[in-house]
Image (cartoon, coloured by chain):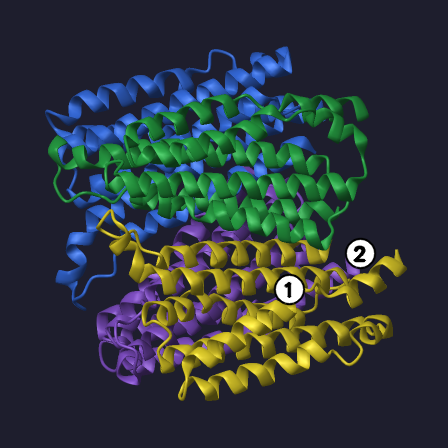
Chain colours: A yellow, B green, C blue, D purple
Amino acid sequence: METNRLEAFSDGVLAIIITIMVLELKVPHGADLEALKPLLPVFLSYVLSFIYVGIYWNNHHHLLKACRRVTGPIMWANLHLLFWLSLFPFATGWMGENHVAPLPTALYGVVLLCAAIAYYILQSCILKGQGDSKLAGALGSDLKGKLSPLVYLAAIGAAFYQPWISASFYVAAALVWLIPDRRIERVIAECE
Amino acid sequence: METNRLEAFSDGVLAIIITIMVLELKVPHGADLEALKPLLPVFLSYVLSFIYVGIYWNNHHHLLKACRRVTGPIMWANLHLLFWLSLFPFATGWMGENHVAPLPTALYGVVLLCAAIAYYILQSCILKGQGDSKLAGALGSDLKGKLSPLVYLAAIGAAFYQPWISASFYVAAALVWLIPDRRIERVIAECE
Amino acid sequence: METNRLEAFSDGVLAIIITIMVLELKVPHGADLEALKPLLPVFLSYVLSFIYVGIYWNNHHHLLKACRRVTGPIMWANLHLLFWLSLFPFATGWMGENHVAPLPTALYGVVLLCAAIAYYILQSCILKGQGDSKLAGALGSDLKGKLSPLVYLAAIGAAFYQPWISASFYVAAALVWLIPDRRIERVIAECE
Amino acid sequence: METNRLEAFSDGVLAIIITIMVLELKVPHGADLEALKPLLPVFLSYVLSFIYVGIYWNNHHHLLKACRRVTGPIMWANLHLLFWLSLFPFATGWMGENHVAPLPTALYGVVLLCAAIAYYILQSCILKGQGDSKLAGALGSDLKGKLSPLVYLAAIGAAFYQPWISASFYVAAALVWLIPDRRIERVIAECE
C-alpha cells in the first residue's frame, strides 16, 4: 500500500511529461506542406523522447513492483529521477527546433545520462532497502544499465563533431531498451 | 492489480490530452463578438476531439476490464495508442485554426486512422494474451472497428476535394462510436 | 470498483483544469508593482474559478460515493460535465484579461450555467441508475441546485448593464456552495 | 478509503504543478551557450521550487497517512494549500526571469509563507478531526514548522535590501526541510 502513492505520483508526473512534450510541436500558421516541413525534426525528437519516457515508465513499473517499503531515501531518489525526466520536454524541444545542432544534441545526451544515473541510484536505494538478494541476483551484471551511460557519454562527445552520430546513438540505445527488463519480471513471477 | 497501473497511467495521459486541447482555444485580445468569431472553428474541432478522446477512454476502459494480465507487448501497444492520441491536440488545433483547410483536415483523418489501427493492435494483443474465446466471440465481426478506418480513409481522400465532406465523415463516425461497446460489457457482466 | 476509474479520470481532468488556469497568469516582463497591477483582475478571477472547480470536485466526490454502478449514460453525463468545466480556464482568462468587460463576464456565466445543468443531468442519471429513494430523499428540494442556475441567468443578463453586478453574483453563488452538501453526506453515513 | 481520493487529487495537482513549472524554461532560439545563459537563473529557481514541491508532497504524504476521516474542513484546508502551491510556477518564473530582483524575490517568499500557513491550518484540521493525541505528541514543539515562516518573513524583508540574502534563506529553509518528518513516521510505525 505504501508504494501505491509513490507509483501514482510518478505516473502522474510521467503522464504529464509525455504529454506536454507535444506542446513543443506548435501549430503552424500556414495550411500547406511547407508549413509542416520545419516541424519534422521536432516531431522526430518527440517520437524519440516519447519512447524514452515510455521505457522509463516500463522499467520504473517493474522496479517499484520489487519494492515493498518506501523509505525517505527511496522517495527522494524517485523525485531526483523525475527531475531529470522533467527536463526531457526542454531538451527535446531545443534539439528538435535547432535541427540537431551540436550543443542542443549534447545537452539532450546530458539529460539522458543524468536520468540514467538517477535511475541507477533509485535502483540501488531499493535494493538496499529491500535487503533482498533475489532482485540483486536478477539484475545480474546489469549490462544494459551499465552500457547505456557510456553510450550517452560517447554521444555527448560526438555531438560536437557530427551531431547525427549522437542522434543515431540515442536511437540505438532506445531500441536496446525497448526490450523489457525480463530479468526482474522473471524473479517476481517466481516469488508469486 | 497489474492492470491498475496501466489504467491509471492511461487515464492520466488521456485526462491531460483532453484538457490541453483546450489550450489551443487561446484567449482573444478583444472583448466583443468579433473577437470570438475566429475561435468558432477552433471551438467546434475541440468539441469533436473531446468526443473522440471520450470515446477512446470509454472503449479503453471496457477493453482493459477484459484484460487480466499485462504483458510487455500489451504495455507497448498501449503506449503506441497513447502516442497517436497525444497528437490530437496538434491535429485539432491545426484543422481548427485553418478553418478546415484541405491538408490539416486530411492530417486530422490520418491521426484518427493511426489511433484506430493502434487500438486494433492493442485489442489483438489483449485477445492473444487472454486466450479467452469469450471476448473474441463478443467482439464478433467487430463491424464498427472495421468500418471506421475505411471512413477515415475516405475522409482523408475527400479532404483534398471538399474538406467539409471529410469533417462530416468525422462527425458521423464519432456519433456511431458514441454508442458504447455493449458487446464486451455484456460478456463481462456474464462472467461476473 | 467500477466507479474508481471514473473518479480517477475525473480527478485527473479536474486537477489539470484547476492547474492550467494558473497559466493564464502570465509572468510579466517588468519586476515592479506596475507590472503586477494589470494581473490583479486575472488573479481574482483565477481565485474565483479555483473555488468553483473546488466546489465541483467536492460535490462530485459526494455524488459519486452514492453511485454504485457506472452505466453508459453516467459515463457520458460525467464527460459532458467535464467538458463545460474544461472551458473554465478560457472563460476565466477572457474575463480576467478584459477587466470584467460585458461579453466575457456574460460568457463566464454561460459556462457556469452549462456546468450547473450538466451536473444536474449527471445527478439525475445516477439517481435513475440507482433506483435508490434514499439519495433522492436526501437531495430533497435541492434548493441550491435549483437556485444557482437562476442566479447565473440573472448575472448573464446583468453583465450587459453593469458587469460588476454579475461578478458579485458569481462570488455570492460560490460562497453559498462552499457549504458542503451535508444532505448526501448524512444519508451515506446512515447507510454505512 | 475516504482519504484515497483526497490523496489522488492532491497528487494529481502536485504532479502538474511540479511539471508545468518547467514550461517557464522556454526553449531558446539560438543553439549556443549564449542562448542558454539567460536561462540559468530560471533553471536554478526551477530546481529550488521542484525541491519545495517535493518537500510538500513528502510531508503531505506523511500527514494524510495520519488522517483517517476526511471532513469538509479538511477538504477545504487541503484545497487552500493546493491554491498557494499552484502559484509556485508563477512566482518561480517571475523571480527567475528577473534574475532575483527585489519584488519578485519578496513575492516568492510571500507564496512560500502562505503555503506554510496553509499547511499549518491543514495539520490543525487533521489533528482536531483526529482527536488523536499521538500525532499531536509526535509533532511536539514542531520547531521546523514554526521557524520556517519566520525565515520566510525575514527573507521577504531582506529582498528589498539584498535579494540574494533572501534567496539563500529560501535555499537554507529547503535544506532543513529535506530531512523527512521522522516524528510522524515513527508514531505511525508504532501504531501499525
User: Residue A7, percent across and down?
Assistant: 64, 57
Mark 1 Cα-neighbour bin, 10 Å: few <14, some 14–19, many ≥20: some
> Who is closer to the viewer here, D72 or D41?
D41
Which residue is found at the position 57% from the left and 71% from the top? A81
Q: Which residue is mark 2?
A: D192
Mark 2 Cα-neighbour bin, 10 Å: few <14, some 14–19, many ≥20: few
Residue B145 figure quarter: top right
Q: Is residue A73 left or right of residue B105?
A: right
Q: Amino acid at mark 2?
A: Glu
Q: Is residue D5 left or right of residue A140?
A: left
Q: Amino acid at mark 1?
A: Leu
Measured Cα–Cα span from mark 1 to mark 2: 40 Å
User: Residue A52, percent across and down?
Assistant: 55, 65
Q: Which residue is mark 1?
A: A178
Residue C119 figure quarter: top left
Quadrant, the N terminus of chain C: top right
